[in-house]
Amino acid sequence: MTTLLFAFLLTFAAAAAFTPWVGRLAIRLGIVDRPGGRRIHRKVTPRLGGAAVLAGFFVGFLVFLPQLAPNFRPGQLLIFSLTAVFLLLVGFWDDRRGLSPPVQLLSHIVAGISLAAAGMAIEEITNPFGGKIPLDQLQVAMPFDAGGRMLNLPADLLTVIWVVLVINAVNWLDGLDGLASGVGGIAAVTIALLSLSAVVDQPHVALLALLLAGSIAGFLIYNFHPAKIFLGTIGSTFIGYVLATLAVISGGKIATAFLVLGFPILDATTIILRRVATGAPPWKPDTRHLHHLLLRRGFTVRKTVLFLYGVSAVFGLTALIAGTTGRKVLMAAVLAVMLVTLLVWLARPVSKTKPTRKLAR
């Protein structure tokens, strides 16, 4: 426990130290968000904050690499790190120049493929009625792979879909000060606690999760409302990528991972379904996310963020206490129905006599 606490505090201190410097760099490069349009902030605010989260995480990652490495196959942590650098470069370009949604989506797919190619894939899921359901029954040779690794279906395909879904779920949360970073931190702490349980017993996963949680917490000092710096695409993509990876390598499997990340995943899923149903492209931005709907109902930015922290914590707590996979599936279904019901209720037309808030950035 002393090691885990030190890991959290190390990345917390590193991210807190890096963030002001990153903010000054973003201003110098002109990578800023300006007030106006769908944005609620009232002054020019630097982006690129996610670079501080990433830097803080990898400071701890390098320090604890000797303890982490024996728990992974050769090359896995290298591929994980190189993929993170790739997403950093893509995110930096999007924050500075802007990339089309299809190009961003392609980068997320590449990240998922890299993870699967490294052998970190969802190889089985627990059957809520007992036993395991293997997902690597169909194997297809990949002649370009000198190591002779086989393509496992549907395991590798499901892994790619999972990575893309989680990255975009976190990315779409980044609409209010501290929302994506705070929810990401809650998810990381939950995964750490689950990994330390007697049933899962994966301290190396807990270590990685707390490295992420610490770096997010150090950044959140500057990101909570009123934010002095924003995550940017770098940050939301990196947090989503690491959370997706942790869920894949954790012994908690899909039911637990869905509970831990249930709130952002359900929000993203309902948005996609609504856009498709209305004939709009799934990536077209709108103001129908849960945080937008709460602002319309008169919630302040701070109250909206704290309420959604609570929702995320409820999902995480449920994952910790649910016990069996069957119970987790049942609780996930109950929470999903409750959240969708809330979304439908909030989506009703707002009375003109009720105060509303300006929409998020």
Image (spheres, rainbow, N blue to C red):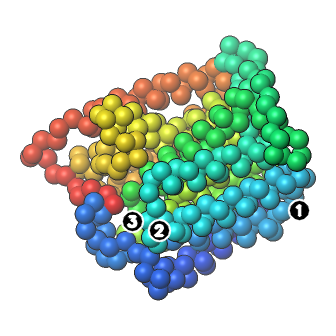
Residue 157 lies, in percent from the top left, at 66, 35
- What residue sits right under mark 3 in the picture? 225
- What residue sits right under mark 2 in the picture? 95
Between discs 1 and 3, the one toward the N terminus: 1
Task: Count neighbours of disc 2 (C-alpha within 10 A) and say few if under 14, some if 14 to 19, many if 20 or more.
Answer: many
Residue under the image location 47 percent in, 68 percent down? 95
Measure how far apart labels 2 and 3 are at the Cα level: 21 Å
Q: Is residue 114 above or below residue 324?
A: below
- Amino acid beneath label 2: Asp
Left of 228 or right of it: where is 153?
Answer: right
Residue 74 lies, in percent from the top left, at 89, 52
Query: Secondary structure beneath disc 3?
Result: loop
Q: In which quadrant will I find the N terminus?
A: bottom right
Q: Which label sits on residue 282? A: none
Residue under the image location 9 percent in, 45 percent down? 352
- Amino acid beneath label 1: Pro
Residue 27 lies, in percent from the top left, at 44, 82
Task: Count neighbours of disc 3 (C-alpha within 10 A) and say few if under 14, some if 14 to 19, many if 20 or more.
Answer: some
Of residues 153 and 220, which is closer to you in this image? 153
Asked whether the residues under the numbered discs 1 and 3 touch, taking CB atoms below 8 Å apart as contact, a structural biologist would say no
Query: Secondary structure beneath disc 1?
Result: helix
Residue under the image location 42 percent in, 26 percent down? 337
Foreground mark, 2 or 3, reads 2
- What residue sits right under mark 1 in the picture? 66
Residue 77 lies, in percent from the top left, at 80, 56
Of residues 47 and 313, which is closer to you in this image? 47
Left of 93 or right of it: where is 130?
Answer: right
Q: Quadrant of residue 148?
A: top right
- Amino acid beneath label 3: His
